[in-house]
Amino acid sequence: MATLNLVQAINLALKQEMQKDDRVIILGEDVGPNGGVFRVTEDLHAEFGDDRVIDTPLAESGIIGTAIGMAMNGLRPIPEIQFEGFLGPAYDQIVNHAARSRSRSRGAVTVPLTIRVPVGGGIHAPELHSDSPEAIYAHSPGIKVVMPTTPYDAKGLLISAIRDPDPVIFFEPKRVYRSFREEVPEDEYMIPIGEAKVISEGDDLTVVTWGASLFQCIEALDNAPDDVSIELIDLRTIDPFDMDTIAASVEKTGRCVIVHEAAMTCGLGAEISARVQERCFLHLEAPVQRVTGFDTLMPYYKLENEYLVNAKRVGTAIQETLAY
Amino acid sequence: MPKQTAYTATIEYVSILDEKGNFDDKLGKGLITDEQALDLYERMTVCRQLDEFAFKLQRSGRMGTYPQNKGQEAAAVGTALALRPGQDWVVPSYRENAALFMMGLPMHYVLLYWMGDERGSQIPENVKMTPLSVPIGTHMLHASGIAYAEKVRKTDNVVATYFGDGATSEGDFHEAMNFASTMKTPTIFINQNNSWAISVPRSKQMNSETVAQKALAYGMPTVRCDGNDIFAVKYVMDEAVKRARAGEGPSFIECITYRLGDHTTADDARRYRDPKEVEAWLNRDPLIRTRKYLEARKIWDADKDEQLQERAKTIVKEVVATAEGIEKPEVDSIFNAMYAEPHAELVRQRDTMRTSSLGKDPSQTGLKSTTQNV
């Protein structure tokens, strides 16, 4: 079995889906011979040619709107938006067309497309290259949002997203792109959209996270005292998220800390927190805590490490919640 | 070095049957048969009657806001005549009903849509069109993508998209033109230049002399025509369709027409439009012009016209009855239509019709209801 990083795992999934299904088409800025700015589509143009790996004009709304048309007419487009900060111009097409088309037409005109977007900070990038807008799209009915963090999950979730009959935003935590490798099967496998993964089991406290923050959570768990047993959940899908797995865990542990890179107010942590108190009220031993990005703009990179969630902040929240 | 000319261009204007009844035999010969002309006249008349009925339905509270097509029927039928229903696509805005009916959309769908029922956009499978599009200027991108799919499948199907003059101010319009052009898709951009975007006249909308010239920036063949002249519209559309079918890429058509009615039933154009301007355009009404043409061809007369008006009323009454006879949709449909499969939270909301459910939801383990069946 090959040992791959996140970029390679996504590339492999794209390649295999394109080999299997000629309706699958990639389009975006620099995705062709250049292989994308993060090289996620490397070598695909050489294998599949101009018709299926399309270097488009520099226009995000155009990329998504055109992809919507392709999807309406039987293709399975995978548009790439170079950075999450540039989703803005495409917001109208995503929310007012991709997300609405099925409902608007009562199922007659559907939009099976997968929008790939690198997400998050921590790579010393310029402004608008480091944001975490997943909650905005989770708040928009009609579009699914996933954010796998590991190479194995990325391959399986990407295949699910491409084959999904509805539009999916596939966020790729860019800080993790080349940060570690793991074994990724060459064979095809799917990870269902909407299923979280329990990374480690525990009885005393539940940590729920997703995206690159997973690694700060793992570090915090490693730093926790040996007699503390913490359950760590990687959400993997942002919308619809796996409340059953979270609730089952919190009913067991009675304590919950939610960790995400995006700003706190109206982040997905708020929604999870609300659902935890609705479903697990009598099991809670402490208030649900959130460790998140601040309610500021993502700073330029000199201060990005101060903004980003780190293991120390996660560890403090864990300690305080356990001590309550 | 002396300065040189970097670029020059001219844009043709095509008119075949003018408002005085003059007919250009050279361009118009064999373009539309008598039989087709009669059919188009009937279709335009039915569409006009539908508008009249729709207006009354709205005023009597039987339908929501409705945008009349009045005055723009020729641009719709003239372009649609060049298309193949069931194969070619139409990506509409909302002021080309007659074209949609020619492509096979049952007439009551449009009424159902404006009556606030999504099933009016549940396009039948054999009809190649997207739903009416309310957000201005955003749907033309879909026409680029739909056309690309036809191109990679190597069909000779083409995609026609309709939009007004105001829509050409939107960024997505330019992106759609650029994508269609660079991807060389079989897309036909049909601009219904009716002079008004609600209350904003074209003079405030743009400083370009024509709308057609906007296509020059995208290296696209472009032409302006008399949009109230079915012959001129058919002529320019034929050329665009021919290019698209041959794999020569997209084309642009500017149809000069006029919105004889208000923007919608929620609008009152008297607030901003000079009645003299409207009056002048009433004389260029495409229905009157087509009727005069048919009369000059000796294939139409007052009796036939009277019969047609009655027939049109009957057709429209039946369409209204069909639309009004469709029962209110089940509320479940708002949940079930969101995704191919509704997710767990949607199912919960659908089945309980509640979002708060203290003690009622079995997933809230341990919580007991504090009330008896609130």
Image (cartoon, rainbow, N blue to C red):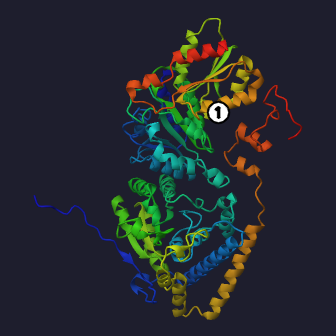
Q: Which residue is mark 1?
A: A271
Q: To which quarter of the image does residue B114 belong?
A: bottom right
Residue B188 appears left or right of B9: right
Task: Please tell me how crowded label 1 is: few (under 14), some (14-19), or many (20+) other residues with Cα within 10 Å.
Answer: few
Residue drawn at x 55%, y 9% as measured from the top left: A223
Vertical arrangement, residue B104 with respect to residue B182, above or below: below
Secondary element at tag 1: helix
How many marks do you count on the picture?
1
Residue drawn at x 59%, y 68% as measured from the top left: B100
Image x and y of residue B223, in percent: 38, 71
Of A10 and A93, nearer the camera is A93
Of B205 and A105, nearer the camera is B205
Chain to which the residue tagged by mark 1 belongs: A
Image x and y of residue A84, in percent: 47, 37
Task: Identify the amino acid type marked 1.
Answer: Glu
Of B363 and B85, nearer the camera is B363
Q: Is residue A190 visible?
A: no
Residue most toward the left?
A: B1
Residue drawn at x 62%, y 45% as measured from the top left: A142
Vertical arrangement, residue A243 with respect to residue B62, above or below: above
Looking at the rendered image, the quarter that the N terminus of chain B falls into is bottom left
Q: Is residue A40 visible?
A: yes
Q: To which quarter of the image does residue B34 belong?
A: bottom right
Residue A320 appears left or right of A277: left
Looking at the rendered image, the quarter that the C terminus of chain B falls into is top right
Image x and y of residue A42, in percent: 41, 33
Residue most toward the top?
A: A226
Vertical arrangement, residue A320 with respect to residue A72, above or below: above
Image x and y of residue B364, in percent: 78, 29
Q: To which quarter of the image does residue B248 belong?
A: bottom left
